[in-house]
Each structure stands twice: as C-alpha cells, then as structure tokens.
Amino acid sequence: MMTQNLSFRQLTPDQLPLILQLLREAATAIQNKGLDQWNTWLQPTDDNISWLQAGLLNNEFFSVITGNQETAGMFRLSYSDLLYWGKQDKPAGYVHSLVVRKKFSGHNLGTTILRMIEAKLLEEGYHLLRLDCNAGNQWLCRYYESQGFTKAGQVKMPHALNNLYEKPLAGNYE
C-alpha cells in the first residue's frame, strides 16, 4: 500500500458522524486487543460530543485521505492543551485522537501522519509537538518513544493516568 499520496482534509461540523465512527472503530480495535482505554468512544457522553464539537468549531480535526480518496484515519491538532498540559510557555502543536483505520494498519501510516503533522507545524513556525497517551498502554508509549518523543511528565485524568510526551521539531521532512 502506498502512503506517499496521503493528504489532510479539514473536517467540518457536519462530519461529526464520521469522527464518531472513526473513534468507535478505534475503540473497538483497542478493546479487541484486551486494552482498557477509549471505552468512552463506544458510547460517548454529552461531554465527549461537546469536546468534539468544540474541536470542529476551532478547525482542529483533520481526516487522512489516501490517493484514491479513502479515509485512512484522522487526528486533532490544536495549539494549546490546558486540560492535559496546563498553561505552557513554549508554543507547540498538540495531537489528540490520532486514529489509523484497521484496514490501513501495518503500513507505517501512524509514522507517516506524525511526520506530515511535524512538517505542517514547522511550516507554521512551531518547533515542538506534544501528545499524551494512556500510561498503561506500554506498546503505545514505546511507539511514541521510538518516534523521537520523550516523556515530559504524567497527568491523572478521570479515566486514566496519562504520560505526556514531547518532541522538538527541526529539519527537513520532505
């Protein structure tokens, strides 16, 4: 499967059902691996829906589109994250809800998406990428560390203990 022809497409508020579908697919895949995370996306609460709607209104959600116009995944990119990171002095991009559809797994799509996000941030003048993940998901923590992220702390959320990761951005991603 070729991943060179990937592009991002801004998602709009009327595409909330697509976002919910992608999150539900990802939550189901996570459950099938025996992991206890993202359960909320199996039956989202009003607060979950409001969080998604706020991101849509702020133009923070993007679909990942293949060369033949299939939706391969999605992510949320914002420029602050008070909930997980609090107020920060260094400007950064924050990734949430990074999803790769099962059909596209095993092709380094997550890595490709992260590199494309990094390139986008550099073009916009940002030199730091941050994200969080469930501290209990050791596979995902190791994955982000293998992508050059370093653990910057932890935050206890109502649903989980999360590791905070950041990565300085520099160089050419072409």
Image (cartoon, grey):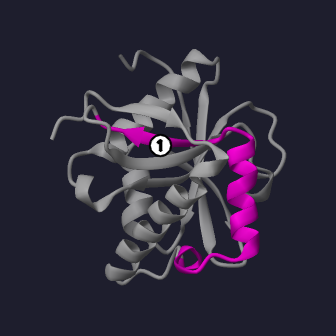
Percent of width and height locating residue 15: 57, 51
Residue 105 visible within the image: no
Residue 163 vertical placement versus 72 (above, below) = below
Of 105 and 22, which appears nearest the observer?
A: 22
Magenta stretch: includes residue 64 = yes
Element type where label 1 sits in the image: strand
Of 64 and 137, which appears nearest the observer?
A: 64
Per the image, the residue denoted by label 1 is 63
Q: Quadrant of residue 141?
A: bottom left
Percent of width and height locating residue 126: 64, 24
Mark 1 is surrounded, within 10 Å at the Cα level, by few (under 14), some (14 to 19) or many (20 or more) other residues, namely many
Q: Amino acid at mark 1?
A: Ser
Residue depicted at x 72% and y 78%:
158
Q: Quadrant of residue 167?
A: top right
State which quarter of the image contains the C terminus: top left
Horizontally, is 23 left or right of 51 in the view?
Answer: left
Residue depicted at x 62% and y 50%:
14
Residue depicted at x 36% and y 84%:
34
Residue 49 visible within the image: yes
Horizontally, is 111 left or right of 21 in the view?
Answer: left
Residue 142 vertical placement versus 61 (above, below) = below
Percent of width and height locating residue 124: 63, 18
Of 17 and 85, which appears nearest the observer?
A: 17
How many numbered marks have been drawn onto this rendered protein structure? Answer: 1
Residue depicted at x 53% and y 69%:
135
For the record, the magenta segment spans: 39-66
State which quarter of the image contains the N terminus: top left
Percent of width and height locating residue 22: 45, 61
Of 33 and 87, which appears nearest the observer?
A: 33
